[in-house]
Amino acid sequence: MHANLHINAISRSGGRSAVGASAYRSGSAVTSRSVVACASYRSGEVLKDERYEKTHDFTRKENVLHSEIITPEGAPDWMSDREKLWNAVEAGEKRIDAQLAKEIILTLPRNLDLEQHKEVVRDFVKENLTSRGLVADFAIHSPEASDGDRNPHAHIMFTLRPVEDDHFGKKLTGRVGGMDDKKVLADFRQSYERILNDASEKADSEVHFDLRSLKEKGIERQPQPKIGPKVTHLEKRGYETEWGKEVRQVMHENNAQAAYAGHLLTHQISYHTSRAVDAVRDDVAYKYYEAAYGENNHKDWYGNDERDRGGIER
């Protein structure tokens, strides 16, 4: 059963912007760069953007199953209002290239239902984000996957500044101890893995999750990229895309590598099995001649004892 965790930065500029990410996923063109637009897309709501004097309306977006804001203990009530929350974040960052928030994408497993997905996300948020004083705004989406089934996942946007009284404090960024620290991401993965396995056990499911990377698992295989709903939709209509070609190429290479590894394993098993059969056959023959001709005479009939020559390990 597949589950994973990814983290992205939502910035005004540099790399893919907040709205650029929204436009990519929705297939719509958005020119402004705003964390408010990002929140509007993920929640499927209408939000007024005070910085850019624009109203973002993603109410027609499909497959938004649930959206919710979780605040740390003691946070003011206005932070539970999506429009007020993200407009405050926008207003609080003055740099034109400011990092406004981060987003965690949780791939949710299919062996759990929507209510269980909600509890998994809430537990993850409370353990890893609100415990740090951060506000988290999450939405659960479930578009169609490339295999025709659903692709449930959660977008968790969270503030980079912790709540202090009725405002935000100093940013928790930085590569050492901050939200950009690789150890923090590793801790997120371990936390999500444990929460998923607890939820799976509670649901009486035998599915176990392992969120370690391929390298950590000792698997020599290229990471499998996702085709994505937009490309899947185009290719179902008969269009062949370059991204689809690249994804299938990686898939073919991984399948070929897996087939070759399977061939080597089968060869090794066959070899060791034949050696074991030969050893057993030789031992049976040895015991037969020993029983038939006596302990002191069996070597003359059976030939030189291979065990004396080291041919059979005892």
Image: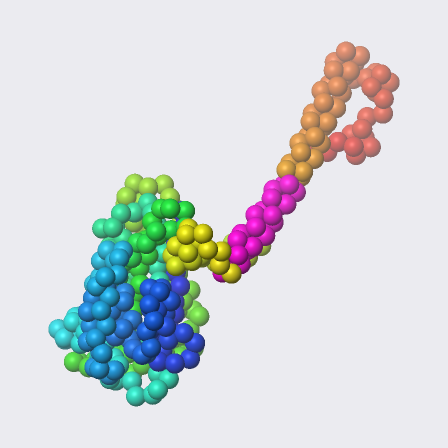
The answer to whether residue 204 is above or below residue 62 is above
Q: How is the image coloured?
A: rainbow
Q: Which stretch appears magenta?
A: 243-265
| Residue shown at 21% from the left, 75% from the top | 55
Residue at the left extreme of this rendering: 77
Taking depth in this image into account, of 233 and 39 the one nearest to the observer is 233
The answer to whether residue 272 is above or below residue 5 is above
Coordinates of residue 254 in the picture (x, y in percent): 56, 51
Count of numbered labels shown in the rendering: 0
| 59 horizontally vs 27: left or right | left
**Residue 146 seen:** yes
Helix, strand or loop for the magenta stretch, by majority = helix
| Residue shown at 22% from the left, 82% from the top | 53
Taking depth in this image into account, of 151 and 73 the one nearest to the observer is 151
Taking depth in this image into account, of 13 and 46 the one nearest to the observer is 46
Coordinates of residue 204 in the picture (x, y in percent): 30, 41
Q: Quadrant of residue 156?
A: bottom left
**Residue 129 seen:** no
| Residue shown at 37% from the left, 84% from the top | 97
Q: Is residue 247 magenta?
A: yes
Q: Quadrant of residue 205?
A: top left
| Residue shown at 36% from the left, 46% from the top | 149
Coordinates of residue 201 in the picture (x, y in percent): 31, 45
The answer to whether residue 164 is above or below residue 258 is below
Coordinates of residue 300 in the picture (x, y in percent): 86, 18
Which image quarter holds the C terminus? top right
Q: Is residue 139 magenta?
A: no
Q: Quadrant of residue 92?
A: bottom left
Residue at the front extreme of this rendering: 238
